[in-house]
């Protein structure tokens, strides 16, 4: 798409802005089993509201919080690539998918930070429910030191109450309002298993991938199939 509204002056201004300002990278971690429009809306809204240069989606390898019944990492990675392909600001990282054994957010953030120029600001984008998991993540103080958080509203979660429970979160957790989307991967898996439609809840390419690879047809996928 051509940006018809931007004048050469605007463009120059933006180039100068990005040269002088620190880079701002969004990190959207998730199981993405499967990725859906709730994830994509949260990432794009965070990119826009926080003027992020790009958003890196990081599908988990073997999420320690969800060890059972997670689909193969390669399927989740490919669906994430398909879902994000149309947005030039979105990229997908294999950092966790290629990692053997359980992965922790703190390690991922350390490795992402090490690969960026000094002064880069990392913003970890989560739904409201995931903020509370900061409390149970490995080294929560380190996680909060490595990245700021952008917590998106999600139906059914009281964000202020959740943030109030996280020590050290003050000033490091920003909240954004996103158009509420009551979509979850677990619900999508259940829908596929009972033959309900998922069109318009996930990008068409993702719906096609799920169909072509016969994902989620049985209520609980065997653990062995998926995790590394
Ligand atoms: P599951 O139901 O299996 O837990 P999920 O839909 O929560 O899946 P995850 O991969 O667990 O998806 O979530 C990745 C991140 O995206 C989390 O930070 C989660 O809070 C956020 N997220 C998921 N769905 C939404 C949504 N509908 N709106 C806003 N954020 C969301
Ligand atoms: Mg979840």
Image (cartoon, helix red, strand yellow):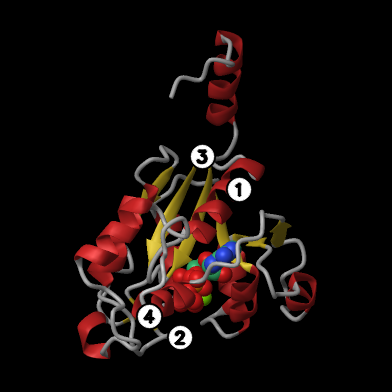
Quadrant where the image shows the C terminus: bottom left
* 108 relative to 20 in the view: left or right: left
Helix, strand or loop at label 2? It is loop
- Residue position marked by numbered label 1 in the rendering: 45
The alpha-carbon separation of the residues under discs 1 and 4 comes to 32 Å
Instruction: Please tell me whether residue 14 is drawn above or below residue 209 in the rendered image.
Output: above
The percent coordinates of residue 165 (x first, y second) are: 75, 81
Q: Is residue 122 visible?
A: no
- Residue position marked by numbered label 4 in the rendering: 194
Tag in front: 1 or 2: 1
Helix, strand or loop at label 3? It is loop
Helix, strand or loop at label 1? It is helix
* 108 relative to 228 in the view: left or right: right
The answer to which image quadrant residue 197 occupies is bottom left
- Residue position marked by numbered label 3 in the rendering: 53
Do the residues bearing badges 1 and 4 touch, measured as CB atoms within 8 Å? no
Residue lying at 69% horizontally and 75% vertically, measured from the top left: 156
The answer to which image quadrant residue 222 occupies is bottom left
Tag in front: 2 or 4: 4
Q: Earlier in the sequence, mark 1 or mark 4?
A: 1
Residue lying at 60% horizontally and 10% vertically, measured from the top left: 9
Instruction: Please tell me whether residue 32 is drawn above or below residue 133 in the rendered image.
Output: above
Q: Nearer the viewer, residue 101 or 119?
A: 101
Tag in front: 1 or 3: 1
The percent coordinates of residue 113 (x first, y second) are: 45, 56
The percent coordinates of residue 57 (x first, y second) are: 42, 57
Q: Which of marks 4 and 3 is nearer the N terminus?
A: 3
The answer to which image quadrant residue 166 occupies is bottom right
The alpha-carbon separation of the residues under discs 4 and 3 comes to 40 Å
């Amino acid at each position: 798409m051509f940006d018809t509204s931007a004048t050469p002056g605007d463009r120059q201004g933006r180039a100068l802005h990005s040269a002088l300002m620190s880079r701002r990278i969004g990190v959207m971690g998730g199981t993405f089993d499967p990725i859906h429009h709730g994830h994509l809306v949260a990432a794009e809204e965070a990119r826009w509201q926080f003027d992020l240069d790009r958003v890196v989606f990081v599908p988990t390898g073997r999420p320690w919080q969800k060890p059972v019944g997670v689909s193969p990492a390669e399927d989740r990675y490919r669906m994430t690539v398909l879902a994000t392909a149309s947005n030039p600001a979105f990229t997908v990282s294999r950092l966790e998918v290629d990692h053997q054994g359980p992965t922790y957010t703190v390690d991922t953030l350390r490795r992402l930070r090490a690969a960026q120029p000094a002064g880069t600001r990392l913003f970890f984008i989560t739904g409201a429910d995931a903020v509370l998991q900061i409390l149970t993540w490995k080294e929560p103080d380190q996680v909060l030191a490595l990245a700021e958080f952008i917590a998106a509203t999600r139906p059914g979660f009281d964000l202020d109450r959740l943030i109030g429970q996280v020590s050290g979160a003050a000033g490091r957790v920003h909240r954004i309002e996103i158009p509420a989307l009551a979509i979850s991967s677990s619900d999508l898996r259940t829908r596929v298993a009972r033959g309900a439609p998922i069109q318009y809840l996930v990008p068409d390419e993702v719906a096609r991938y799920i169909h072509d690879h016969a994902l989620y047809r049985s209520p609980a996928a065997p653990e062995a199939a998926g995790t590394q």
